[in-house]
Amino acid sequence: MNAVSRTVAQSDETLQMIVGMKIKEALPHVPIFDRYINREYILVLSNRMQKMANNDYNFNDVNFRIMDANVNDLILNTRCENPNNDNTPFKISIHL
């Protein structure tokens, strides 16, 4: 299987050492007639590991960052984008 990668975010200032990532669903879920649209977002924790490793840590600087981004925005116009996908894990029907 050929893997294709694409950079979706880059910053030498804020993305120095990524120490954690998690995909979450934004709440509340918004009911739209016959389906729920879930908004997924990614949380990223970064730190200045090189400063800790070099014993050059400055407590007056920002040393940890928590960043978030909408998953659909990140995968827009990439191979991961599915135009038929509304990020819905399940569908419901409303019968009137």
Image (spheres, rainbow, N blue to C red):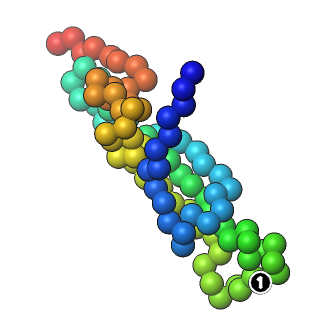
User: Looking at the image, which residue sits at the far front?
Assistant: 2
Of 5 and 17, which appears nearest the observer? 5
Of the pair 11 and 62, the residue shown nearer to us = 11
Position of 95 with respect to 86 (left or right) is left
| Residue 26 in the image, given as x and y percentages of width and height | 43, 44
Most foreground residue, 87 or 78: 78
Q: Quadrant of the N terminus?
A: top right
Q: Nearer the viewer, residue 66 or 16?
A: 16
Identified by mark 1, the residue type is: Asp
**Tally of marks:** 1
Q: Quadrant of residue 55?
A: bottom right
Residue name at image x 21 percent, y 11 percent: 95
Q: Position of residue 73 (x, y in %)?
A: 35, 46
**Mark 1 Cα shell of 10 Å, populated few (<14), some (14-19), many (≥20):** few
Does residue 62 appear in this view?
yes
Which quadrant of the view contains residue 89? top left
In the image, residue 62 sits, relative to residue 32, either above or below, namely: below
Position of 90 compared to 33: left or right? right
- In the picture, measured across the screen, residue 7 lies left or right of residue 21, that is left
On the image, which quarter does residue 96 sit in?
Answer: top left
Answer whether residue 27 is visible to the viewer in this image: no
- What residue is shown with label 1? 56
Q: Residue at x 44, y 50 (%)?
A: 8
- What x and y, as percent, mark residue 77? 31, 39
Q: Is residue 68 left or right of residue 94?
A: right
In this rendering, is residue 26 above or below 86? below
Q: Is residue 86 above or below residue 72?
A: above
